[in-house]
Structures are given as structure tokens and as C-alpha cells.
Amino acid sequence: MHKTIIHLFIELLKPKTIKMISKRKLILYIAASLDGYIAKPNDDLSFLKIVEKEGEDYGYNDFISTVDTVIMGRKTFEWITNQVEYPHADKKSYIITRAQKPDSGNITYYSENLKELILKLKSVSGKNIFCDGGAEIVNELLKYNLIDEIILSVIPVLLGEGIKLFKEGLHEQNLELLGAKNFDNGLVQLHYKFITD
């Protein structure tokens, strides 16, 4: 028996036939020592040199191709730009700072409510958003459940002191492991997504 137009219309409305638009994600892509420090005292990142290897980017170029927006703290931004030319000049960057500064090219110095900024960015279409640190920004985002995924490269060193990636006082949050890779120099890269209700 032939289906009537009404039956066809009802089938078209069923959830299985509706394509969901994927949500824009905020991803923390960061490296830390085995004991959880992202920097030694005085913002010293020299420990990262122990895993530098010619021709190995630990998936960074593949990751960065999925991103069009970067969020980072002022200290992180200043450390990077004191070492090299800013590597994300082709992407929209929000530098989170308490001091107001004039924008420059794709760089916006942002001193307003961080939660509101992230919710606004997630509400518009685009590629993923990359959180590049530092710890204050990361922990503020975690406080409001704004990070969707974490790609954490664990460096095979115990620093003993420095700047901790995760601060005390965060609420409990469950994650699902999406992947794990180990490299011959001892670096292990873990990819998690947050489990939401």
C-alpha cells in the first residue's frame, strides 16, 4: 500500500531524519609535568625542551586546523611574544587581562566577564575555540563548566613546584577518554571530553 503524503510528512519530522548541527567546542590543549605543573617558578617553560624533536609536533598542526579562535591569559601571551612572533595572528584572539588595551589586528584585549565571552562565542557558528592557558584562565573556565575537551601532553619530568594546572577548590567533573598516544621520548598525550548531563 502506498504511503499517503501525511505519512511521509510525519516520517520526515521524526528525530532520526533531522541532522543535528555540531556544537562549537572550547578545547584546552596544553602540556604539563607529570606532577601537574604547566610552568616552573617565574613562568619558566624551559622543561618543555626535553620533548622537542625535529619533525614532531605531537598533533598540534592537525589540532590547530580545527580552530579559528584563541583564548589566553595576558601572562601567557606576553611569554609567547617575548620568545617568538605571535603564532596565531591569522586567528581571532582574545587576550584576557585586567588592564584595558587597544585591539591590534585580530587581537582583542578582553577585560570583561569571561563566562559571557565564551557563551557568546559558542552561540555563533565557527570552528573550535582553543584555550592556550594560563592556569587562572583554565580554572575560571572549569569553574563554569565551559571547557568541552582537554588534550593534555604529559611531560616526563617531576618539577616539584611552579604553576599548577588545576587549582584546589574545583567541583568534581567526570571525563571520558577519547584517546591516548605515547611517544618514544616519554611524552604521553591524553584526550578527554567532559561528560555532561
Image (cartoon, grey):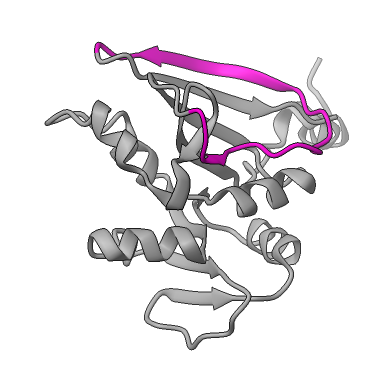
126 relative to 168 in the view: left or right? left
**Residue 11 covered by magenta stretch:** no
Q: Nearer the viewer, residue 96 or 70?
A: 96
Residue lying furthest bottom = 102
Q: Which residue is rendered at x = 63% and y = 28% of the image?
A: 193
Give left or right: position of 32 versus 186: right
Furthest toward the left, the residue is 54
Residue 39: percent from left, percent from top: 45, 42
Q: Residue at x 51, y 58 (%)?
A: 72
- Asked whether 4 or 164 is in front, the reply is 164
The magenta segment is: 160-184
Specify whether residue 165 is painted magenta: yes
Q: Quadrant of the N terminus?
A: top right
Rendered view: 133 above or below 162: below
Q: So how many labels did they put on this image?
A: 0
**Residue 150 or 10: which is nearer the viewer?**
150
Q: Quadrant of the C terminus?
A: top right
Vertical placement of 185 versus 137: above or below?
A: above
Question: Which secondary structure type mostly characterizes the magenta part of the structure?
Answer: loop
Classify residue 196 by image quadrant.
top right
Give the image location of residue 105, x and y in percent: 37, 80
Q: Residue at x 50, y 28 (%)?
A: 160
Q: Residue at x 42, y 44 (%)?
A: 66
Decide: is 8 above or below 139.
above
Q: Position of residue 157 (x, y in %)?
A: 39, 22
> Is 30 situated above or below 144?
above
